Amino acid sequence: MLYEIEIRTNKEFEIIDITSKVQKIVEESDIQEGIAVIFTKHTTTALIVNENEKGLLSDIEFLLRNIIPRGKGYMHDKIDNNAHSHLRAILLNPSIVIPIKDKKLELGVWQSILFVELDGPRFRKVIVKLCSC
Ligand code: ZN
């Protein structure tokens, strides 16, 4: 079973909580126990599991902007003006794996699945693959 989540982002940098969308896919599947693989199909986006708290989301943006500032003479900027977006993406993850138990994502109380847009606004696709095991 392969599912797709479509995400329309609105800003250059944006963090979008997709936990409820993934949980809905799990609930509507026939998987009782197994794993969910969530994968973003883009080179300037990422997925993380962390707390969806407004201040923390700002801190993540602050951290990435400071570690990898825009326009530092990157080679990729000569052909596509978004080297900083690619470089920020490689510090994060293109995919995450979450266990499923009793038709629910086994996330901790403060854990959310966060989609990170690093070069928006754009139309994005995230793949969800569910496996029974
Ligand atoms: Zn590029």
Image (cartoon, helix red, strand yellow):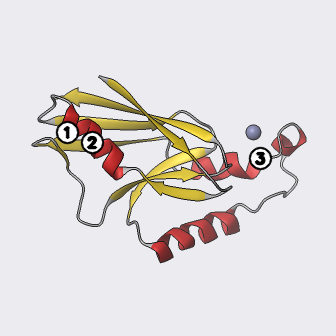
Q: Residue 27: x and y, percent?
A: 19, 39
Disc 2 marks which residue?
Answer: 24
Q: Nearer the viewer, mark 3 or mark 2?
A: 2
Q: Where's the N terminus, which quadrant? A: top left
Disc 1 marks which residue?
Answer: 27
Q: Is label 3 within 8 A of ligand 1 (CB to nearest ligand atom)? A: yes
Q: Where's the C terminus, which quadrant? A: top left
SS for dot 1: helix
Asked if the residue under mark 2 is in contact with the one under mark 1, i.e. CB atoms within 8 Å, the reply is yes
Q: Residue 19: x and y, percent?
A: 34, 51
- Front residue of 83/45: it is 45
Asked if the residue under mark 1 is in contact with the one under mark 3, i.e. CB atoms within 8 Å, the reply is no
SS for dot 2: helix
Q: Residue at x 39, y 61 (%)?
A: 50
- In the rendered structure, which disc, 3 or 1, sits on the residue that comes first in sequence? 1
Amino acid beneath label 3: Asn
- Front residue of 95/10: it is 10
Disc 3 marks which residue?
Answer: 82
Q: Residue at x 60, y 47 (%)?
A: 90
Asked if the residue under mark 2 is in contact with the one under mark 3, i.e. CB atoms within 8 Å, the reply is no
Relative placement, left or right, of 73 versus 54 is: right
Q: Residue at x 23, y 38 (%)?
A: 26
- In the rendered structure, which disc, 3 or 2, sits on the residue that comes first in sequence? 2
